[in-house]
Image (tube, helix red, strand yellow):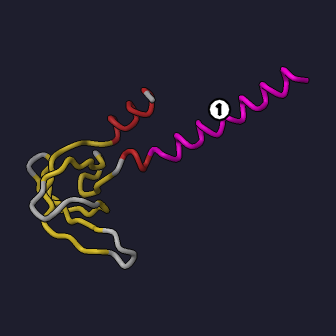
Amino acid sequence: MIVVSLIASQSYGKTTGEIISTMTSDVGFDIHNIQYTVDGVEYIGSRQSSGESIGDTLTVYYNKSTPSVLETPVTQLMPIGAIVLVLGVVSLILAFRKKKG
């Protein structure tokens, strides 16, 4: 987890944004347009979310190399977590079989 946190902190910046508009997708979830500022430059990005309304402020994460791109670090890092979990389970199974046999 520490390594994952370090990777995220190097790739993503964090700031506060304000929801300026909302639309509902064809499958029923909310997509918010969020206005945020990085180094004095204003950006508008979109992200899926629920439970928030126009005018609400929230923490947003952006790509440090391309601040106009909003990111969701947890979602981006989920595949890494899944791979680590699968490798751990496979290792346990192999160790158990080796010990038993």
Q: In which quarter of the image is residue 5?
A: top left
Residue at 23% x, 62% y is: 45
Q: Residue furthest right?
A: 101
Residue 87 lies within the magenta run: yes
Instruction: Indicate the secondary structure of the residue bearing disc 1.
Output: helix
How many C-alpha atoms fall within 10 Å of the one at disc 1: few (<14), some, or many (≥20)? few
Q: What stretch is highlighted in magenta?
A: 77-101
Report x, y in % for residue 36. Answer: 14, 54
Please say if 1 is above or below 70. above
Report x, y in % for residue 26. Answer: 37, 79
Q: Residue furthest front?
A: 51
Quarter of the image that includes the N terminus: top left
- Magenta span main SS: helix
Left/right of residue 7 with respect to residue 84 in the rendered view: left
Which residue in the protein does label 1 denote?
Answer: 88
Q: How many marks?
A: 1
Q: Quadrant of residue 20?
A: bottom left
Q: Nearer the viewer, residue 73 or 100?
A: 100
Please say if 77 is above or below 53. above
Residue at 53% x, 42% y is: 80
